[in-house]
Image (spheres, grey):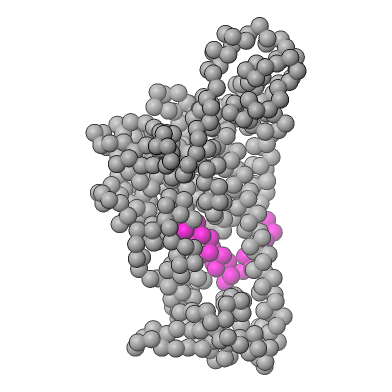
Amino acid sequence: MDVQSEEGCMKAPLKPKPLSKLMGEHSKKLPEIFGVGVSATVKGKYVHWDKLRHLVPPPNLDYEEWWLGIKLARSQLLRATPLTDASGTPFRYAMPDCVLEMLHQIDSKARGNIELPEQVTNRESRDRYIVRSLMEEAITSSQLEGASTTRQVAADMIRTGRKPKDNSEQMIVNNYKAIQSIRDLRGEALTPKKVLELHKILTMKTLEDPTAAGRLQQAGEKRVYVADNATQAILHSPPPAEQLPERLEKMCLFANGTINGEGEQGFIHPIIRAIVLHFWLAYDHPFLDGNGRTARALFYWSMLSQGYWLFEYVSISRILKNAPAKYGKSYLLTETDDNDMTYFIIYQLEVMLRAIADLDTYLQRKIQQVQAIETQLKHASRFNPRQLALLSHATRHPGAEYTIASHQTSHDVAYATARSDLLGLVDNKLLQVHRIGKKKQIFVAPENIQEKLRLLD
């Protein structure tokens, strides 16, 4: 089966001349190139040839001479990874100042003992934010690959436990289960078997060929490729299927830290390892479908396994979904510039920082909402954090409906705890309860809930 691009319509970046050809044509200008101090970056940016040709070059240099100087400067910084293309050429990456700065920022924010609001560190409320993040990542990661269900419908489906109605909803449910399994796998060694099991969870009941769930593409099977949806131009042709078992084994060795580059045992920054793993699975495209979702799930496994606990709360797919063409282009920039993965690494670091910033904004908004409810309530101590969170939602959505199952899922608590929370709010006349059938109860926020809160004794 041919698979079109997950990233939508885009144009492949213009590929520069090979370095050997540039050297042959411009070697006489090397003294001038070195004399103007050409470096690996342009004003701190790691620029591709496709963009560089629209900038103003240094005095006395044309664009190709300028690019030659940049490539020579980068050659001193590049480190090889064990990932190779189909011809055996390794992918490499550099660590310019912009990368080092972003790594430092993420290290400071996402790892170790950092100060966070009590709403996160409190056990009762912490689980709610983890569930919210799992749902957000499950939904947006699926939407990146074509799921058309709205966020609200998908979130309600997960909270209530309703069975999926179509392929899009099934993708989201699968993704939610897969991300939950990633939490359980953190710290365990990655194996080909676990990668295949993860893919099976992600694609169950969504493939035209059900036997393709949880297995690599096979020799003799028509290989998937990535194409532009509008022009049908092939953007990426992954390695042949016969290479996939060995490549998957090697990827797992890299993920576990057994190999880093060209068989070396040297240090590689943990975040770089997670990003390379993300790129690796997506580059190999070993499955009939679900490659992007699997790649992002492995990224989360790597981050959590290496101590970046904040990423339990962060959704990178939400950021990627807002600009899917940039996500796709970050792969193409790498492939059109001598397998230089620095472009992809920089983009992913930027995405991670934006996702962390979004989390901070979300937490501050939720804290203010809860504080407003606590101020409005004369006796807030009678309500636990889960009940306060529900009241915060109910005051902004009078008429909203809740069930024991949805409350249980939202806060990752036992059935009895969820039931007790809701009945406690009924006793305080802050929720109304209706019975549907013999067993199911629906709890409804009254239209005058604001007034009831003010009158609460």
Prevailing secondary structure of the magenta residues: helix
Of residues 243 and 346, the one nearer the viewer is 346
- Residue 107's x, y, as percent? 64, 46
Q: Residue at x 49, y 63 (%)?
A: 151
- Foreground residue, 31 or 408? 31
Q: Quadrant of the C terminus?
A: bottom right
Q: Position of residue 91 (x, y in %)?
A: 49, 28
Residue 406 lies, with reference to residue 140, above or below; the image says: below
The quadrant holding residue 224 is top left
Residue at position x 69%, y 70% in the image: 368
Q: Is residue 61 visible?
A: yes
Residue 115: x and y, percent?
69, 59
Q: Is residue 343 magenta?
A: no
Q: Residue pushed farthest front?
A: 231
Observer-nearest of 69 and 95:
69
128 is within the stretch colored magenta: yes
Find the magenta span and give its range.
110-139
Residue drawn at (68%, 11%), measured in percent from left and top?
Answer: 30
* Left or right placement of residue 324 versus residue 195 in this view: right
- Name the image quarter holding residue 66: top right
| Residue 191, visible in the rendered structure | no
Q: Residue extending furthest top?
A: 28
Q: Is residue 186 above or below residue 83?
A: below
Q: The N terminus is located in which quarter?
A: top left
Relative depth, front residue between 254 and 88: 88
